[in-house]
Amino acid sequence: MSGALKLGVLDTDTADTGDYMTEFSRFFGFTNLFNATGQPSMSVPLYWTEENLPVGIQFTAAFGKEDVLLRLASQLEQARPWSKKRPPDI
């Protein structure tokens, strides 16, 4: 599975809870609360393991406040740049 869900796939106003749970379970991991509620969240790589693999830290904002997350991501990227980091070749 790749890419974002199409709008309306996780419609909480559905009578078909089985279908909803099937779709929901494909995405819930550690982000299930925010996937279900529609609150904006982001994961940014702020730590790297000894193997040089990124560890994402999740941030969440109030509903409709994506701008807060984008400003935070910009500030974090300036403080701990990650855009040029690449995992090691395997």
Image (cartoon, rainbow, N blue to C red):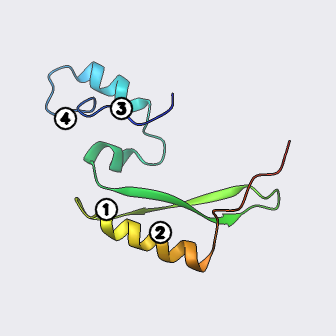
Residue where numbered disc 2 is placed: 73
| Tag 2 near tag 3, CB within 8 Å | no
Residue where numbered disc 4 is placed: 12
Kind of residue indicated by mark 4: Thr
Q: Position of residue 10 (x, y in %)?
A: 27, 33
Work out which quarter of the rendered image holds the C terminus and state it.
top right
Residue where numbered disc 1 is placed: 66
Task: Work out how far the residue at label 4 is from the one at label 1, CA to CA, in angstroms.
Answer: 21 Å
What numbered label is drawn on residue 24?
A: 3
Q: Secondary structure at mark 1?
A: helix
Q: Earlier in the sequence, mark 4 or mark 3?
A: 4
Q: Position of residue 67 (x, y in %)?
A: 31, 67
Q: Is residue 10 shown left or right of residue 82?
A: left
Q: Earlier in the sequence, mark 4 or mark 2?
A: 4
Q: Is residue 73 shown left or right of residue 39?
A: right
Q: How packed is label 1: few (under 14 Cα within 10 Å), some, or many (20 or more)?
A: some
Q: How packed is label 3: few (under 14 Cα within 10 Å), some, or many (20 or more)?
A: some
Residue 31's place in the image compared with 73, above or below, is: above
